[in-house]
Image (cartoon, rainbow, N blue to C red):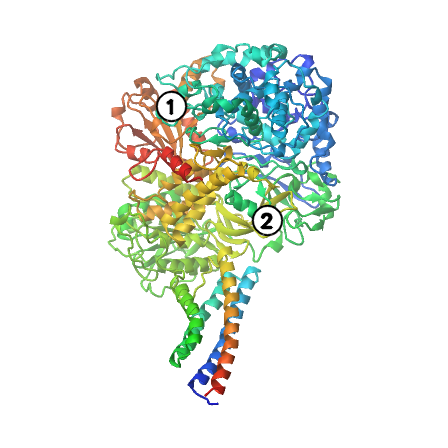
Amino acid sequence: MSTYNPNFVPPAHAPMPLNGNNFVNGVQGSVQQQPGPPPGQQYIPQKQPQQFQQPPPAAAFPGAGAPGNVPPPQQFNSGITNQFLPPTSGAATPLQQLPPSTLPPHLRPPAANGPPLTNGSNGASSANSSRTASPRPVGAAPQYAQGPIAAALNNPPLASGLRPSPQPTHQSLANLTSNLENLNLNTTRANGGTSILPQPQTQQQYAPTVTQKDGRGVASAQTGPPQFNDANSLLAASGVAAALVPNAMATPFSGQKPPNLAPNPAKMFGSASMAGRPTPAGQRIPYGVPPPTNPEQQSQQNNNLQNAPPPPRVGAVWPPSLPNVAAPGAQPMMPPAQQTPQTYPYSQVYQPGPQQQPPPPQSAVQPPPPGMFGTQPTGAPLQYQAQAPPQAYGQHPQQAPQTAPGGPYGTTAPLNVAQQGFSRLWGQDTIDLMQNRHILTPATLPPPKVVLHNQFHESINCSPSIMRCTLTKIPESNSLLQKSRLPLGIVIHPFRDVNSLPVIQCINIVRCRLCRTYINPFVYFVDSKMWKCNLCYRVNELPDDFQFDPATKTYGDVTRRPEVRSSTIEFIAPSEYMLRPPQPAMYLFLFDVSIIAQQSGYLEAACAVLNRHLDEMPGDARTQVGFICFDSFVHFYSMAEGLNQPHEMTLLDIEDPFLPRPDSLLVNLKECKELVRDLLKQLPKRFAHTHDPGSALGAALQVAFKLMQASGGRITVFQSCLPNKGPGALEPREDPNNRSAKDVAHLNPATDFYKRFALECSGYQIACDLFLMNQQYSDMATISGISKHSGGCVHHFPLYQKTKPHMVESFRSCFKRYLTRKIGFEAVMRIRCTRGLQVHTFHGNFFVRSTDLLSLPNVNPDAGYGMQISYEESLTDAKTICFQAALLYTNSEGERRIRVHTVCLPVTASLPEVMHSADTEAIIGLLSKMAVDRSVASNLSDARDAFINATIDVYNAFKIAQNLPSGQSGQLIAPRSLALLPLYILALLKHPAFRVGTSTRLDDRVYAMDCMKTLPLDQLMKYVYPELYKIDALIYHARNSNISSNQDDDEDEDEPLPELPRLQLSAEHLDSRSIFLMDCGTLIMIYVGLNVPPDVLEAVLGISSTAELGDYVYGLPNVVSNENDVLKRFILRLNYDKPYSALVQIIRDTSTAKGQFTERLTDDRSESSLSYYEFLQHIRAQVK
Amino acid sequence: MAFNFTAFTYIVALIGDAFLIFFAIFHVIAFDELKTDYKNPIDQCNSLNPLVLPEYLLHIFLNLLFLFCGEWFSLCINIPLIAYHIWRYKNRPVMSGPGLYDPTTVLKTDTLYRNMREGWIKLAVYLISFFYYIYGMVYSLIST
């Protein structure tokens, strides 16, 4: 399949300017040079080339920095009435990932089901104009039929199976060879389908006992010719009678198309594709079938295949990701593996039926040789296929695929192979979790793709990094949702730094008159003057100036407007969106200077960072800053004009605080910069010798509020001990002897003083951010109220000491990011849902002002939110539903802006579809938020039980949905989409937020819970389930590139890093001869095994033996070597989408810090918790 | 026909119950306003919270009168509500002032619906007991 050259596109598309870029990104140069396939094979369906026009989302290339990755920014020229600004770029983080939704509209490809070839060059417009037509009934679009029919009629019989793959990758070629080799394991392909083709929707998972090995058989078959036959026999088997199947089996594949297939395939697949079956990323699409997915998805898949580890085939013999993921040692063999098959004409490769597999080049198929350190490379995709029975703990995963081809359930294989393969095709395959302990694979990791109906096929949905729903298909009624037992909700990261964001300034922003929804790509244009709101279904008029297309400066086509082309967009709001003139940036800093604070010495670091980054704080010429210090009293600093140094005033009456003077406490930063710098230099010294144990936080907050009341802004509080003076004084509540007790008390605030304060602040558009650098219990649960209800953020540095350089370093980078990141003032966010749904509960830091409106005095790019959704009425009439989040804020330049994100999801009535479309990460994100609420409202053990019950319920529901036999079967069947649920749930149960039995300080626990509520999903997942990599392959890569760099130095830098497979967090993956890297979000731990070869140590860490490593080593040493350089680049890539770069800690195997590392190996058992396998057994025992 | 303490109790209970009905109606209206975005939850809680304790105390006072005059049946039908009130107030969110409603949680759909339902049920209870008190008053007046 991948022998199809991507350059091989119909002439109409050939000149598309972006092709070159894409190929450079996605496919190695050598592939481009390949001559096209023989003319006989040039029957590529018309839709084929379109996917190549899609610039691959840059996500898979975070660090590569290839220029072709970034689509050219939109250049909207100012029009008559509208002014289009160039896209804003997240200046603070220029390396930010590019979400797919930010593709410039004019680069978007036509619909996958779009126009025929003749239309190709302006396919976009015709695809769009098709949207303005009346909606055609799903399942009857004639143009879908064209491709397949043409192919079926015009080509030699064999050709039906030779349909070019939608994934022209050379990795899959390498896979192909193995697949071919594997084919003779599966003799089940048949071309005997003679029945009327049933609707694929009726396709059920008939045989739950199918083993992974069997499923793989079909997956591999799909790469080969007998594609239609597979599908057909499957349909026959499932739709009519299973008896057909043996018959089909008996018919050897002869390269002939079944006679009845020709007239029908278009119908069959056309309807199938319109049914909008889920095809999660990485899911292989059968190559004979017109791709049921939209072009973005496919190009995403291309990308996945090329950059990320490719889709794992269940039961694949060796890691499908071999070429890139390659273990050390495999690399040199890759060139033949990639190129040999490509040079074959198709006939040579494919003509032999599956029965006569030509042995593929052995060098490519062989498992990679032992790793460079003499160990076998362990790749996650590999282990995923492990058929090793559960008791084979510790057995090397490499051996697993060599178990019986039929797997434990080999007897049922012949029938199920086809079914399994077909359900894989729809993303509906299942996994027996008990058999597949190594579940963390590239197939389970990426978020499932949203597949919309044809009408919106070409509309780009909101990036999953911004907004994700727990279900990518919405159940049509509440009862269906209840049957699935899955939580429905969205997790959203609304103010995320994005690279290119269309910004629009126009006089009137087009909104629905009834529900005030912003116009979005998913609305329906009745005609060129009217549009129908997709949330409330009201038909609205379009203003005349909406007809103007700023990109081409033409009138008439509304579908070219950026509002309609991008589901993430920012408007510059006109004055009716302001209640008052936009406020300036106002920053007030509150420093705790009590004796404990002085001992910790945070003030030096804070003032130094502040001093350095004073100029980088967002704001215009009106920016104002102020400083207040507090111990038992409150110290003000007046920086009035005319003073040559700051003037301190101390407020002694903390019970009834007042402002000592009305002005000069908050000063203009530009005008008084010298005074401010002077103050920041003096502050640490000023209180260096105080011995005041008091901390009058309440009083300081009250005066801060008075100071900020007039304008609103941000109060940053540094607190290092329990506030014990004046209003809001607290008593220590934690019992240190009870830290590992089963029931955790005092998760609730002790007083509502801080909450009331926050509410008051929220009313005046003031947000409070808290940096807690405590030495002892400081009642985070109570104090963090100031941030929770005012839209602030909380940072926690427990046991901060200036003598601990890593803490200082960590604090510095965190505080630097805090100061310099974007900020939105006086913000509100409204979540609108399609009629029938409503937001049930909000999670995050904000104040809920009405049922769908969040008041966010400040919004920052690192804050995530979650919403539970509930049903008001059933959605039977709706085909799709939308969520729209609109964030209205004032940016630091005093401009009022609205950022709108829209996500559109299909509705389904089928329970299995709902289950298969679940998004595990989003579910975990939502469940953890709900569990925090439960812990606070009820107690921790309730929340823990709820986690376990949720998992059990989901699998129970799936069992019912799939009509699996009830009772104990020794299996735990899970849909692929939910395969990781127990893994993550177990990690959550062992997380500091929810664990019991392990000593956890109350403040740490409360902070962890706060993180659960407020972290955006990508960071939350790292926080819950850190990423573990074995970096031997990197080092190997470095050595390799070392050799090559001698030849050409230029390309060395830009060479992409190999994709490393993620390992599950279990000690069984560790070995003493390798180096491992664990990315926990804000901390990256490098674990150095005891027997790592000295030359590697020398090259990577600049030491000759592990004994030279101290117990606590932070920061990667600078060594002039390729290995060190590559590792740095790898870490840079990991840090890419984090708010600030993580601290690197190096842990020697025998170090006392090893506990920090092993504590995060959540798959293993500990004294008080279950191992992953035990947990699975527990779940299985409970699933009825 | 005699005007005794029982009759007096019922007359007081009638008047008190009329107030309770007003409280319940106000409660329902307030939450409906919240639901339809007419009011800010902070304002709404500020207006609702001061009324919670007076309502509870008035209700308990009426039942004390029933206790003193030995109207056991009237007392019995009110005891569940008293118990509910006590339970409710014991489990209120952490707050310094009197009252039940926390502006940060009052807009959660669960809480909102629970409060709405509570308002309607209490209104029904008060209305039914109002008619029972009328009956009780008349009965105590005509029987001697």
In the picture shown, does residue A177 fall above or below A952? Answer: above
Give x and y (percent) for residue A192: 64, 20
Q: Secondary structure at mark 1?
A: helix
What amino acid type should be assigned to the residue bearing mark 2? Cys
Q: Which amino acid type corresponds to the residue marked 1 in the rendered image?
A: Asn
Name the residue rendered at 54%, 61% in the picture. Answer: B34
Q: Is residue A1044 visible in this depiction of the protein?
A: no
Residue under pointer 1: A1124
As helix, strand or loop, the secondary structure at mark 2 comes to: strand
Q: Are marks 2 and 1 on the same chain?
A: yes
Q: Is residue B79 visible?
A: yes
Question: Neighbour class for label 1 at 10 Å: few (<14), some, many (≥20)?
Answer: many
Query: Which disc, if any, is residue A287?
Result: none
Residue A833 image label: 2
**Chain where mark 2 sits:** A
Front residue of B104/A622: it is: B104
Residue A111 percent coordinates (x, y): 67, 32
Is B72 on the left-hand or right-hand side of A877? left
State the image coordinates of residue A808 (x, y, percent, origin top left): 33, 40
Residue lying at 41% horizontally and 55% vertically, measured from the top left: A642
Q: Is residue A19 shown above or below A495?
A: above
Total of numbered circles in the picture?
A: 2
Q: Residue at x 75, y 25 (%)?
A: A118
Rate crowding at label 2 as few (under 14), some (14 to 19) or many (20 or more) other CA atoms within 10 Å: many
Q: Nearer the viewer, residue A828 or B141?
A: B141
Looking at the image, tell me whether mark 2 or mark 1 is earlier in sequence order: 2
Considering only vertical position in the picture, is A38 above or below A568?
above
Question: The disc numbered 1 marks a residue on which chain?
Answer: A
Q: Position of residue B75 (x, y in %)?
A: 42, 74
